[in-house]
Image: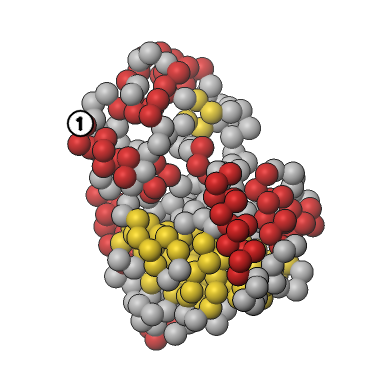
Amino acid sequence: MAIYVTGDTHGADSHGFFSVDGYMRRFSMDAFPEQREMTKEDYVIICGDFGGVWATDRFSPDESSSEKSSLDWLNNRPFTTLFVPGNHENYDRLMGCRNQRLMDSWFYSGMSAENKERLRQGYPRMFWNGGYVRAVRPSVLMLERGYIFKIDGKSCFAFGGARSHDIQDGSLDPADYPDEASFNKAYRARRGRMFRVRGISWWDEEMPSREEMDMGRRNIESFVQQGKIDFVFTHEAPASDKVFLNYPARDELSLYLESLRNIMTYDKWFYGHLHDNRRMFQNHYLLYEQILPIC
């Protein structure tokens, strides 16, 4: 058995001529030949911004045809894929829509009551190896925040999420407008600015709730009495790493992760989000397109 870890994939396909994004390219046999010797008891872990569940359909929560075929392809790889959520994920579809205001607005007025209920549920939630996951496919699992999973005999703390850095000009909320025409007018007025749309390209759940943060801390505090954590998998970096890399480091999640760093003993910490490959300090790793074997 083995564990490999990598950074953001941002969906199945590559974006742009020079991009290395896209899990179908990254996990192809040519790019990742190690999989020839792997089985479903081997794991590839993506440190956030998986992006394989992305499209918003105002009438149905179902996967698009391209999503379905790509996720089926990933499920048929010889290994099991795990990912922590990032800031570029469709949280409504992954974990269930909790935005009742949006659900009651014109935006979802064409969706049936049955489909709205399915959208509220998200992908199936199940207990797996010590914590809760969302089963996108039998061997494509999202690790929920705050749990310590046992993976290939290793204790692994997972805590996804990050604050988006591509939303400097704010967000546009469809529920703030009485109809589609007025929303489209507001959207056109913002063209050329850096903004995203709530429920379409941005979700509040990119940042963890207080309940998730408190649970993660409690689980860490309970576990440290048993011994060290082998691996930490996050999307965001702890604050001290971001300071070293000259990134702003005062957001709540970076500071929270830094506080956890100070109370736990661990072997290695892996994160994505910053689109680079670096070994940070002695045992921290920033990953993007690199696929790193860790055990």
Above or below, 291 against 125 in this view is below
Q: Position of residue 118 (x, y in %)?
A: 26, 42
Q: Identify the element where label 1 is drawn.
A: loop
Q: Residue at x 65, y 48 (%)?
A: 253
Q: Residue at x 74, y 47 (%)?
A: 249
Above or below, 222 against 175 in this view is below
Which of the 4 quarters of the picture holds residue 210?
Answer: top right
Which residue bears the numbered disc 1?
112
Seen in the image, is 222 located left or right of residue 183?
right
Q: Residue at x 53, y 21 (%)?
A: 190
Q: Is residue 7 visible?
A: no
Q: Residue at x 23, y 26 (%)?
A: 110
Q: Nearer the viewer, residue 23 or 256?
A: 256
Q: Position of residue 158 (x, y in %)?
A: 54, 62
- Which amino acid type is marked by label 1? Ser
For the N terminus, the image quarter is: bottom left
